[in-house]
């Protein structure tokens, strides 16, 4: 049995290792399009900070790990998938045949339509190659402008700040982390960053990046609610989100929306082809709609489930991914889970203590917690996710939480204990 895996990120690597555990004789090939050992993109900021060396980003550290498992790791780019003849075509001219194919190709950075965005000195922060270029330019005191303040951007932001650069962040939305945090929480994170000497322009838009002579490399034209301004920059980083890598699947017959549509067994609409990780679009646990959850915990979980299905263990199912985000922004921990924006006809409970950098917001549908947001309250992270994912009926505890959301731990213990007794 030939198992071919497109993508050398966490989902693909975990899937390969799980397949090997379940089948000691199968042929397993991982195809990654970067000239690197398989690594974690989420570790790149820690490398930029200096907490880990470049090798520390690698997913597996034991020498000869993949060779020991008899997993063939190839560095090549897949250009096409022929689902009729069961082959994948590589950019080096080779074709690789498969019996079972896993597409775990991940995602790539979005490229904003800004004049000058493609110049040398303007980078994404997505690959180890990007990290090397950024490290060479992000010296102490260097003027750095980051475009975007989403989840990944905030992780990059901390790495840059800890390199002692003069950092300015430009975000088009009215708050930081707009797809993870409500208005109160997003602006609290912005205020926190400003206190840490980071300049933040929300409701801002980079209009043009112009290369200049002089003390700095660029003039960056930024439009804000109060007018237009020009900012000096030695380095510009584009961090405006990512999109699934699906362009090579044209004419493959695989159903694609935003990502690759999968069922509960991680199967695509084409027999013997599966998808997992950032490229997979499966059912959202909370809404029942199809969505991409581009986070590493989901990618890893997908890898375990898809491996079992690829070797024929059909009992392994993905019950739906839950929208979950946990972020550390220069020491301020924030999180959001599920339907944190709330639902029509639902109720909510909020506590705001801006002077203490604490915030919690709970969203209910009937007596079930369906979403939540918190800042500065790490003790509630697991409980919040647990109540949402278990769809626990809170009964009288719902009314208590409406009065005081800080009772969420008591509500969890009481409600889950009652459910267990039943």
Image (spheres, grey):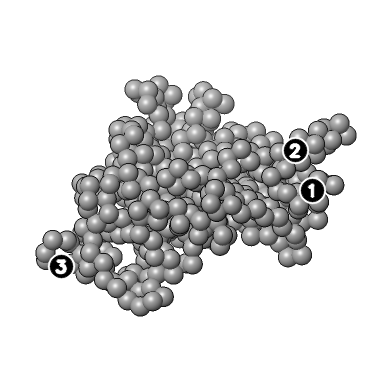
Asked whether the viewer can see residue 280, the reply is no
Nearer-N-terminus badge (1/2): 1
The residue positioned 40% from the left and 56% from the top of the image is 194
Residue drawn at point x = 39 percent, y = 65 percent: 201
- Side of 383 relative to 60 (left or right): right
- Coordinates of residue 18 in the picture (x, y in percent): 53, 30
**Residue where numbered disc 3 is placed:** 212
User: Could you tell me how far apart the alpha carbons at marks 1 and 2 are, in whole angstroms?
Assistant: 10 Å
In this picture, residue 402 sits left or right of residue 200: right
Locate the C terminus and report the quarter of the image it occupies.
top right
Q: Is residue 32 left or right of residue 22?
A: left
Q: Are marks 3 and 1 in contact (CB under 8 Å)?
A: no
Determine the CA span between mark 3 and mark 2: 60 Å
Examine the image and state in which quarter residue 159 appears. Answer: top left
Q: Position of residue 296 (x, y in %)?
A: 50, 42
Of the pair 204 and 268, the residue shown nearer to us: 204
Residue of label 1: 400
Q: Please tell me how crowded label 1 is: few (under 14), some (14-19), or many (20+) other residues with Cα within 10 Å.
A: some
Residue 190 visible in rendering = yes
Q: CB under 8 Å between callouts 1 and 2? A: yes
Residue at disc 3, secondary structure: loop
Mark 3 / mark 1, whichever is N-terminal? 3
- Give the residue pinned by disc 2: 410
């Amino acid at each position: 049995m030939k198992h071919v895996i497109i993508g050398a990120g966490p989902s693909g690597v975990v899937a390969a290792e799980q397949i090997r555990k379940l089948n000691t004789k199968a042929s397993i090939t991982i195809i990654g399009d970067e000239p690197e050992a398989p690594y974690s993109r989420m570790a790149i900021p820690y490398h930029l900070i200096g907490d880990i060396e470049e090798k520390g980003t690698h997913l597996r550290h034991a020498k000869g790990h993949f060779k020991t498992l008899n997993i063939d790791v190839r560095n090549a780019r897949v250009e096409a998938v022929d689902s009729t003849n069961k082959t994948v075509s590589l950019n080096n001219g080779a074709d690789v045949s498969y019996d079972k194919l896993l597409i775990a190709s991940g995602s790539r950075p979005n490229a904003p339509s800004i004049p000058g965005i493609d110049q040398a000195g303007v980078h994404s922060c997505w690959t180890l190659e990007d990290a090397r270029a950024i490290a060479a330019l992000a010296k102490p005191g260097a003027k750095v402008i980051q475009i975007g303040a989403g989840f990944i951007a905030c992780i990059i932001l901390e790495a840059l700040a800890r390199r002692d650069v003069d950092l300015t962040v430009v975000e088009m939305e009215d708050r930081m982390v707009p797809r993870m945090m409500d208005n109160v929480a997003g602006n609290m994170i912005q205020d926190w960053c400003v206190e840490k000497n980071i300049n933040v322009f929300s409701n801002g838009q980079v209009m043009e990046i112009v290369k200049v002579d002089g003390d700095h490399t660029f003039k960056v034209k930024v439009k804000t609610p109060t007018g237009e301004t020009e900012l000096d920059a030695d380095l510009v980083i584009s961090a405006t989100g990512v999109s699934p890598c699906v362009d090579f699947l044209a004419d493959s017959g695989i159903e694609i929306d935003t990502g690759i549509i999968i069922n509960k067994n991680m199967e695509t609409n084409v027999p013997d082809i599966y998808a997992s990780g950032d490229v997979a679009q499966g059912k959202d646990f909370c809404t029942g709609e199809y969505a991409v959850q581009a986070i590493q915990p989901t990618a890893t979980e997908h890898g375990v489930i898809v491996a079992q299905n690829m070797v024929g263990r059909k009992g392994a199912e993905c019950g739906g991914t839950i929208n979950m985000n946990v972020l550390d922004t220069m020491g301020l921990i924030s999180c959001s889970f599920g339907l944190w924006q709330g639902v029509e006809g639902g109720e909510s409970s909020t506590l705001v203590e801006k002077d203490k950098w604490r915030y919690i917001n709970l969203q209910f549908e009937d007596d079930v917690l369906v979403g939540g947001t918190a800042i500065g309250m790490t003790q509630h992270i697991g409980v919040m996710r647990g109540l949402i994912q278990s769809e626990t009926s809170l009964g009288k505890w719902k009314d208590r939480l409406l009065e005081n959301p800080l009772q969420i731990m008591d509500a969890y213990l009481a409600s889950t204990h009652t459910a267990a007794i039943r």
